[in-house]
């Protein structure tokens, strides 16, 4: 973090010096100084934001700042919550009695190798074949339905 603040301080110093020269020169000098200022301001951001080419190809989105595992955990949690809401809304179940666990979650494809839907309470009488068809038919992964007693 200290390195980032040092870069910001250096950018501020360069911007100050360049702005002094920009007021004294002609049109071409002002344009050149403006381009230099934009480049100088954007340079420290290159350490934080991946290159534009990586963003277009999808290569740099998961590795920003070393937080790829955090992104995967959040995506997996959102995926499980989405499957939970899908099952509950399609079958008219209470979300308290449905829990979804993913195994082998693939972040890039937003798909799980195996989706485990656990039914408990009043939801144990839900149609497990319909749940399985709903999840697998949506391309979300291979589905298993279990009943939790206790």
Image (cartoon, helix red, strand yellow):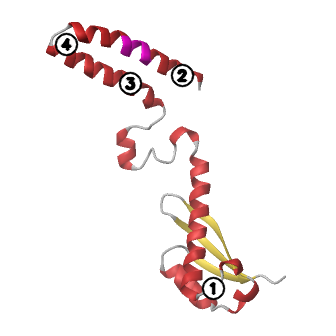
User: Crowdedness of circle 4 by 10 Å Cα count: few (<14), some, many (20+)?
Assistant: some
Q: In 3D space, how far apart are the residues under numbered discs 1 and 2 (Cα atoms)?
A: 52 Å
The disc, 3 or 4, on the residue closer to the chain's N-terminal end is 4
Q: Name the element at disc 1.
A: loop
Residue 96 position in % (x across, y down)? 70, 78
The residue closer to the viewer here, 26 or 4, is 26
Q: Name the element at disc 2.
A: helix
The residue closer to the viewer here, 29 or 133, is 29
Q: In 3D space, how far apart are the residues under numbered discs 4 and 2 (Cα atoms)?
A: 29 Å
Residue 45 position in % (x across, y down)? 44, 30
Residue at mark 3: 41
Location of residue 147 by image quarter? bottom right
Residue at mark 1: 93
The disc, 4 or 1, on the residue closer to the chain's N-terminal end is 4
Residue at mark 4: 29
Identify whether 129 is placed above or below 53: below
- Highlighted magenta segment, given as a residue range: 11-16
Q: Is residue 95 left or right of residue 64?
A: right
Helix, strand or loop: magenta stretch? helix
Numbered circle sitting on residue 5:
2
The disc, 3 or 1, on the residue closer to the chain's N-terminal end is 3
Identify the residue shown where x is 49% and y is 17%.
9
Q: In 3D space, how far apart are the residues under numbered discs 3 and 4 (Cα atoms)?
A: 18 Å
Q: In 3D space, how far apart are the residues under numbered discs 2 and 3 (Cα atoms)?
A: 13 Å
């Amino acid at each position: 973090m200290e390195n980032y603040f040092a870069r910001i301080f250096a950018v501020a110093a360069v911007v100050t010096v360049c702005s002094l020269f920009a007021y004294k020169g002609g049109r071409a000098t002002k344009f050149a100084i403006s381009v230099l200022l934009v480049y100088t301001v954007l340079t420290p951001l290159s350490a934080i934001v991946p290159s534009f080419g990586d963003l277009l190809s999808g290569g740099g989105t998961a590795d920003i700042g070393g937080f790829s595992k955090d992104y995967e955990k959040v995506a997996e949690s959102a995926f499980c919550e989405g499957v939970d809401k899908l099952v509950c809304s399609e079958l008219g179940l209470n979300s308290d009695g449905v829990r979804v666990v993913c195994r082998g979650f693939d972040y890039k494809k937003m798909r799980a190798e195996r989706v485990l839907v656990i039914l408990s309470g009043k939801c144990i009488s839900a149609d497990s074949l319909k749940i399985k068809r709903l999840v697998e038919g949506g391309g979300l992964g291979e589905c298993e339905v279990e009943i939790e007693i206790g």
